[in-house]
Image (tube, grey):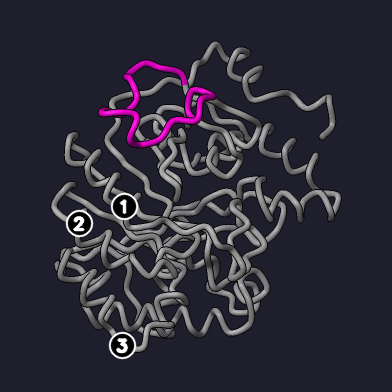
Amino acid sequence: MNNDIKTFQTTLKDHNLKLLRRDITTLQINTGLLCNQICKHCHLSAGPKKSELMTRKTMDEIKTFATGYTFKIIDITGGAPEMNPDLPYIIEILKGLAPEIILRSNLSALSEFDNDSLIELLKDATISITASFPSINEKQTNVQRGNGIFSTSVHMLQKLNSFGYGIEGSGLKLNLVSNPSGAFMPASQEDAEKRFRKVLMSKWNISFTNLFSFTNVPLGRYKTWLKESGNYDSYIQKLIDNFNSEALENLMCRDLMSVSWDGFIHDCDFNLAAGIHSGDRKTHITEINKPFVNGSAIITDNHCYSCTAGAGFT
C-alpha cells in the first residue's frame, strides 16, 4: 500500500473522533466460509473449497452465552450459511433468544435444497432474510457472482414471496443488499431502492422490504482483485475522499459483537476477515459471560474507511 495514504486512525484524530462501543444489541455469528459462489467482491474469500465450518459444539457454546444476555438481533452469516449442514440446528436452538434473527443468504445456496423444508423452518421461526442481490442488470450480476446466478436469484425471490417473505403485512422481512461490481462507490441507497422496486415488480412481480446499498470492503478476494488490477491505492483514496464523519454514529460495530465459526470474538465480520481479534487478544466465546463493555475502543484498520464512506455501512 502507498505509504502516503492516511490511516483510518489518523483520519479519526483529524476529526477529533473516537470509535467507541455502545451497549451491545447484536450478536453476529459466522457459520463458516463454505459457499457455492466465488464472488469477486467477497471480503472473506469464501468459496466451495473452504473447509471452515461451525460445529454443533460451538453452536451450543454460543447458545449458552446468548442465553445469559438479552440481544435485540442475532445475525447469522457466512460464507453461505445454508452450506453449513447444521444451519437448521442453530436456528432451532437460537429462536426465541432475540426479537429478530436474521439469515444472510446469497439466494442461490437456498435454491440448492431439494425441497422447501429450510424455507418452511425460516418462516415458522419468523427469521428475517437479508439476501444478496447486487444488481437488476443480469450481466453485471453474473459477472460478479457467476453464470446463471441472476436467474436463480430471481426465481428464489419469487419463491420467497410465495411464502410471504417481503409481502407487506406478513411480518416476514426480505431485505436486499446491493453492491458495486467494480472499484467505485455504490449508488444512492434511496435512488437504488426506488429503481429496484420498480424493475423487480414490473418484470418479475417481486416485492421486498428494504434495500441496502453497501460499499465493497477491501479485504479478501476483493482486495486481491484491487491489487492485481492496480486499483487498490486509488480505491482506498476514493474511500478516504468520501469519508463521512456523521456515519460513525450508526456504524454496526458500535453495538455488535462477531463470533467466528470456531467461536472466537471479533469487533465485526470485517475484522474477522482481516484476522483482527477484539482487544487484540484471541478470546473464545466460552471465556466470557457478557458482551463488550460500553465505551470501550473498537480496533480499526484502513478497511474501516468502507464503512464511513458516503452514507456509511450500518
Residue 42 against residue 3 in the figure, above or below: below
Residue 94 in percent (x, y) is at: 21, 53
Which region shows up in magenta? 278-297
- Indicate which disc, 3 or 2, sits on the residue closer to the N terminus: 2
**Residue occupying the far bottom of the picture:** 114
Q: Is residue 194 visible?
A: no
Query: In the displayed structure, does residue 37 sit left or right of residue 130?
Result: right
- Indicate which disc, 1 or 3, sits on the residue closer to the N terminus: 1
Q: Are marks 1 and 2 in contact (CB under 8 Å)?
A: yes
Q: Secondary structure at mark 2?
A: helix
The stretch drawn in magenta includes residue 226: no
Residue 142 in percent (x, y) is at: 63, 77
**Distance of label 3 from label 2 (alpha carbons):** 22 Å
Question: Which label sits on residue 93?
Answer: 2
Query: In the displayed structure, does residue 281 sit left or right of residue 121?
Result: right
Question: Which label sits on residue 59?
Answer: 1
Residue 238 against residue 106 in the figure, above or below: above
The stretch drawn in magenta includes residue 282: yes
Residue 239 against residue 196 in the figure, above or below: above
Label 2 neighbourhood size at 10 Å, few (<14), some (14-19), many (20+)?
some
Label 3 neighbourhood size at 10 Å, few (<14), some (14-19), many (20+)?
few
Q: Are marks 3 and 2 in contact (CB under 8 Å)?
A: no
Label 1 neighbourhood size at 10 Å, few (<14), some (14-19), many (20+)?
many
**Distance of label 1 from label 2 (alpha carbons):** 8 Å
Query: Which residue has dot 3 on it?
Result: 115
Q: Are marks 1 and 3 in contact (CB under 8 Å)?
A: no
